[in-house]
Amino acid sequence: MRKVGIIIIWIVVAACVCILVTLPINLQTQLIASVTVVAIMSVIKFMRGEGRWRLVALAFGSSIILRYVFWRTTSTLPPLNQPENFIPGFLLYLAEMYSVMMGALSLFVVAMPLPPRPSRGASETKFPRVDVFVPSYNEDAALLANTLAAAKSMDYPADRVDVWLLDDGSTLQKRNATNILEAQAATARHEQLQLLCAELGAHYLTRDRNEHAKAGNLNNGMKASKGELIAVFDADHAPARDFLRETVGYFDEDPRLFLVQTPHFFLNPDPIERNLQTFDKMPSENEMFYGIIQRGLDKWNAAFFCGSAAVLRRKALEETDGFSGISITEDCETAIALHSRGWNSIYVDKPLIAGLQPATFASFIGQRSRWAQGMMQILRFRFPLLKRGLSFPQRLCYMSSTLFWLFPFPRTIFLFAPLFYLFFNLEIFTSSGGEFLAYTFAYMVVNMMMQNYLYGSFRWPWISELYEYVQTVHLLPAVISVILNPRKPTFKVTAKDESISVSRLSEISRPFFVIFAVLLVALGMAVYRVYAEPYKADVTLVVGGWTLLNLIMAGCALGVVSERGERSSSRRVRVNRRCEFGVGDKWYPASIEDVSVHGARLHVFSKTFDPLETGTHGVIKFRPYSSAEEETLSISVRNTQAAGDITSIGCLYMPKSALDHRFIADLIFANSDQWTKFQLSRRRNPGLIRGTIWFVGVALYQTSRGLVYFFRSLRSKDQQEKTQPIGVPGE
């Protein structure tokens, strides 16, 4: 009876909403209603309303969006008998409806996300056996050594955990390749990694052939191991000491739990953060997903496997014959398969691993292309909306995650739609300037406010739009390719531990400068048409404003593709740990101020410290988290700087054996609390107005920086051509 009552209430509410949305009112009343809603949402935000007040604000915003959708559908489409206007106009309409649909799905997922879960350590009397898989393909041995060492140092009974290096870069297929250089490289890698694993106490495993990419590699690891639980870490994702302590306990509470997923935290900025220099002051792009969206998915039992930083139950995986490998995103596909069989997942919102992001813009785009193509394959082969076994909320959650990657299509349309009017005088959006203000502008403001409500300090204004724009240029052909041929994409490993020593334009930057030039001409055309056609000034001003917004975004992207050189090849992490520094037969009290995967910076305290030459060998002595005794690590001095009684020393690690990587891993990865503190230090909400002003300032600066890089590259190319010897073709 109660269920029937709830259904009746929903029907009544839906009817009221439909009446409100379709109510015929004049333009002035609509403008007043829009201003009123914006004011109410602003007051609730200013009063920091949470819980029900948050839902009230989102409901008011949704009413304006639905009013816009109704008006847009019934009053703005060009007539069918004008195909030159109707076709591009209808494409623009579809792009807007896609955005509204994705906004509705996002609202469903994250309107009231679960609060962060408390940690669930393993029972003091029962420690399930865990196999730790580190799949590898072409990563450097030193990178793998740090990850394996960190995995071996996790706070868990040593006899209950086995660490496996799953090496797909030295398969028998590769060692017997017809190309002798490739075969020799694979053989040398095979021997090197076998020795590394033997010294660290890890298991080394490879296979005959590279089949089914990462999924096949993980499934091969399952055949060789027997642990009740399986932890997966990418080759560049090193776990903190408390990773297993914070995760395995959940499996005792729910026998149908197949996954505990934790966030991916990165030590280095992605190319956009590095080139815009926002890494230390603005939340990273992935924090919106791991800080809000995954908690929203978790509410509906739809948090999915992200390929790394997770623990899975072997029994569940055996039901689906291991990790799924139809798509190139085996992680999400595996989660769908297990959710549809009635298994559960949870998400623990605490960074317990630290990894590396692609350093170059080209590698970043390559990674995102794989994600986009894999999600399109899942949409094609699994189609979550009709997937048997999923609950209705789970279907909506997975549709939200997969449909998101269609964003290159609407982004492209939004980018070029104003040009149809400015260059070809096509009327693809039938409205006046007043209607635009009352409906479209109100919709845009309310939509931005709702985004701010949903994501707040996790995503600053206009940053999502920037990330989508810079990806769209190269993701559009990748998405079209997989739609036309869903079985074509193959798994490509993202480059790890790259560095850029010299500032330069990205090798895939050319389209961004072409688009910027076209938009600049379009803006000039808008200014000309305002004066030449004053009777159309209201519409032209609207289209010109739209073009200006696109131009600001395109200008900021010029800075994104202008790669900044880095003096340091890896990112430094502040640690502040006590140690002793030894050189020769002298020891000095010191502290380790920051560390990276290659070296550290020390503060040595002494009134009589002798200057050191570059290359001087020394030793640091400190107490690891995993040991009660002090350990030593050899270093080489790179630079020194004295300031009073403190001498700052930059040093390079000089590991003498693989075991020394345990101490390096302890310095960088052992303490997960430092990553949480760093994330929290960046999470603040500048608000829409301040955030917009900040973004415009960044965009203007990055536009000028990008143009400087562009003209510098032209001058450099011209000089190279002039100095090219006669008869020798240019590169």
Image (cartoon, grey):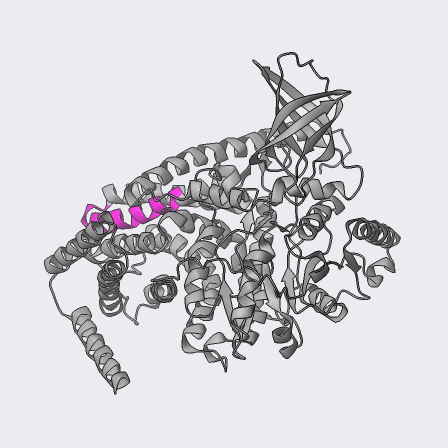
- Where on the picture, by quarter, is residue 52? bottom left
Point out residue 246 in the picture as x, y percentages from the top left corner: 55, 57
Residue 122 placement, left or right of 99: right
Point out residue 186 in the picture as x, y percentages from the top left corner: 83, 54
Residue 221 placement, left or right of 395: right
- Where on the picture, by quarter, is residue 84? bottom left
Image: 188 above or below 1: above
Residue 518 placement, left or right of 643: left
Residue 228 placement, left or right of 618: left
Residue ranking furthest to the top: 608
Nearer to us in this view, 483 or 32? 32
Q: Is residue 566 visible in the rendered structure shown here?
A: no
Q: Residue at x 52, y 45 (%)?
A: 673
Q: Would you say residue 547 sits in the magenta stretch?
A: yes
Point out residue 399 in the picture as x, y percentages from the top left corner: 45, 70
What segment carries the magenta color?
533-552
Image: 520 above or below 70: above
Q: Residue at x 39, y 59 (%)?
A: 115
Q: Main secondary structure of the magenta part?
A: helix
Point out residue 612 in the picture as x, y percentages from the top left corner: 71, 17
Quadrant of the image for the N terminus?
A: bottom left
Q: Is residue 3 visible in the rendered structure shown here?
A: yes
Quadrant of the image for the C terminus?
A: top right
Nearer to us in this view, 559 or 529? 559
Q: Would you say residue 179 sits in the magenta stretch?
A: no
Nearer to us in this view, 354 or 486? 354
